[in-house]
């Protein structure tokens, strides 16, 4: 996944009080803002639309992952069917 100007990452660790689950690598000169949970919640309290923006972005990412997962499962299912056909031919 490629992030663009204004995108964010690492939010899961703030919401779930867990360690991050992914690494990020910059492909070009990048400016990054680090924010802790207290500061983020304070900013959301000042501007609740920020939370809505974050939810929209997270929802879009989840939808994208679900689509990818469905494609992988479809491909795997076709490959499974081919393996089953070969097994039946050999028996």
Image: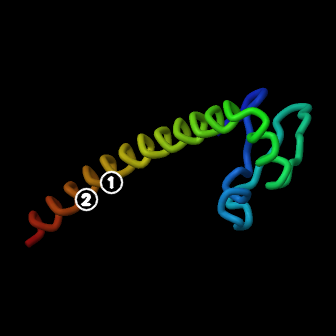
Residue 6 screen position, x and y as percent: 77, 29
Q: Quadrant of the C terminus?
A: bottom left
Determine crowd level at label 1: few under 14, some 14-19, many 20+ residues with C-alpha closer than 10 A. few
Residue assigned mark 2: 80
- Would you say the residues marked 2 and 1 are in contact, meaning their CB atoms lie under 8 Å apart? yes
Up/down of 4 relative to 12, above or below: above
Q: Nearer the viewer, residue 41 or 74?
A: 41
Residue 21 screen position, x and y as percent: 68, 61
Q: Residue at x 30, y 47 (%)?
A: 74
Secondary structure of residue under mark 2:
helix
Q: Nearer the viewer, residue 37 or 70?
A: 37
Instruction: Say whether residue 31 is left or right of residue 69.
Output: right
Q: Residue furthest bottom?
A: 91
Instruction: Say whether residue 12 is left or right of residue 47.
Output: left
Residue 42, numbered circle: none
Secondary structure of residue under mark 1:
helix
Q: Quadrant of the N terminus?
A: top right
Up/down of 12 relative to 26, above or below: below
Residue 77 screen position, x and y as percent: 27, 54
Q: Residue at x 69, y 35 (%)?
A: 48
In 3D space, how far apart are the residues under numbered discs 2 and 1 (Cα atoms)? 6 Å
Q: Residue furthest top?
A: 5
Instruction: Say whether residue 25 is left or right of residue 81.
Output: right
Q: Residue at x 85, y 54 (%)?
A: 36
Q: Residue at x 73, y 61 (%)?
A: 20
Q: Quadrant of residue 61?
A: top right
Residue 57 screen position, x and y as percent: 60, 35
Q: Nearer the viewer, residue 18 or 36?
A: 36
Instruction: Say whether residue 84 is left or right of residue 39.
Output: left
Determine crowd level at label 2: few under 14, some 14-19, many 20+ residues with C-alpha closer than 10 A. few
Residue assigned mark 1: 76
Display coloring: rainbow
């Amino acid at each position: 996944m490629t992030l663009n100007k204004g995108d964010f990452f690492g939010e899961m660790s703030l919401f779930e009080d867990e360690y991050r689950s992914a690494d990020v690598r910059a492909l070009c000169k990048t400016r990054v803002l680090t924010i802790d949970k207290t500061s983020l919640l304070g900013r959301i309290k000042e501007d609740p639309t920020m939370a809505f923006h974050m939810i929209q972005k997270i929802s879009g990412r989840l939808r994208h992952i679900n689509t990818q997962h469905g494609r992988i499962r479809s491909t795997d299912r076709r490959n499974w069917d081919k393996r089953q056909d070969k097994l039946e031919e050999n028996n």
